[in-house]
Image (tube, rainbow, N blue to C red):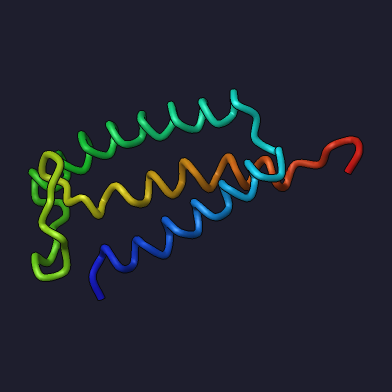
Amino acid sequence: MTYLLLNTVFLLLGTAVFLTAVRRGRLSRHSIRAAGIAMAAVLVLTAVFDSIMIGVGLVDYDPSRIFGLRIGLAPIEDFAYPVAAALLLPALWALLERKPND
């Protein structure tokens, strides 16, 4: 199994939960914008710190299991988890929050 295939599961789950929260009106425009800003921040941090970890030899990837596209030294697959987290966490928070009229 490739990392890209494994990441697809997390991305689909995160996207589905996020869209559910949006459709149910649980995420305001402000919350959606905040999630986008958080996503941008974690993507930059992932590029920097994963590149450092790979550069110093702390982690490595089997070339036969990655797509091949890299940002810095980090394979593109490394960026799926921050994207999934930036979508999933605020959506779950919003969906699980108890409102006075719930």
Does residue 80 appear left or right of residue 25 in this picture?
left
Q: Is residue 72 above or below residue 19?
A: above
Q: Residue at x 40, y 35 (%)?
A: 39
Considering every residue shown, the one lying at the far top of the view is: 30
Q: Nearer the viewer, residue 101 or 48?
A: 101
Q: Residue at x 27, y 39 (%)?
A: 46
Q: Is residue 100 above or below residue 85?
A: above
Does residue 2 appear left or right of residue 26 in this picture?
left
Mark count: 0
Considering every residue shown, the one lying at the far bottom of the view is: 1
Q: Is residue 57 above or below residue 65?
A: above
Q: Residue at x 16, y 63 (%)?
A: 66
Residue 51 drawn at (x, y percent): 15, 41
- Quarter location, residue 11: bottom left
Residue 17 drawn at (x, y percent): 58, 52
Residue 88 drawn at (x, y percent): 53, 48
Q: Residue at x 52, y 26 (%)?
A: 34
Does residue 86 appear left or right of residue 99 in this picture?
left
Q: Is residue 30 above or below residue 23?
A: above
- Quarter location, residue 25: top right
Q: Quadrant of the N terminus?
A: bottom left
Considering every residue shown, the one lying at the far right of the view is: 101
Considering every residue shown, the one lying at the far front of the view is: 23
Does residue 102 appear left or right of residue 90 in this picture?
right
Q: Quadrant of the C terminus?
A: top right
